[in-house]
Amino acid sequence: MKLEDKLFLVTFVPDSETHLSAIKQETCRTCAGKPCISGCPAACWEHEAEKNEVLVSFEGCLECGTCRIICPYHNIQWKYPRGGFGVKYKFG
Ligand code: SF4
Ligand code: SF4
């Protein structure tokens, strides 16, 4: 089974507010390789070329914490979604 097919099976209860974001876009602009993009298993991070900003689609976050750990500048604000929201495998 391909990764995309596996991700399709994961269900979420999306919150209305994000639980993670890049703190300073200036830091992202000079970040070589932008590891949050390549390291996220759910492809939540992307580089928006027009504004030269790194954006995150928090709704599909698997809450693995990888981006927070691999960001070389500790430039990601990260917390779990509010109770009752987020990826559903947490709920058993
Ligand atoms: S790894 Fe950190 S500093 Fe680099 S682009 Fe991602 S959020 Fe920005
Ligand atoms: S916590 Fe994991 S799934 Fe969520 S955005 Fe970060 S790397 Fe991607």
Image: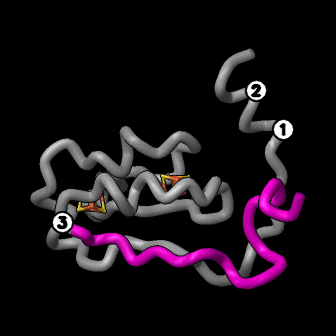
Q: Residue at x 58, y 44 (%)?
A: 42
Residue 5 is tagged as 2
Residue 48: x, y in percent? Answer: 36, 55
Q: Earlier in the sequence, mark 2 or mark 3?
A: 2
SS at badge 1: loop
Tag 1 and tag 3, C-beta contact below 8 Å: no
Residue 19: x, y in percent? Answer: 56, 77
Q: Earlier in the sequence, mark 1 or mark 3?
A: 1
Q: What's under tag 3, amino acid-wise?
A: Tyr
Tag 1 and tag 2, C-beta contact below 8 Å: yes
Tag 2 and tag 3, C-beta contact below 8 Å: no
Residue 73 is tagged as 3
Residue situated in front as seen by the camera: 66 or 42:
66
Q: Considering only vertical position in the picture, is 91 above or below 10? A: below
Which residue appears farthest toward the right when viewing the image? 92
Q: CA distance from mark 2 to mark 3?
A: 32 Å
SS at badge 3: loop
Segment tinted magenta in the rendering: 74-92
Residue 20: x, y in percent? Answer: 49, 73
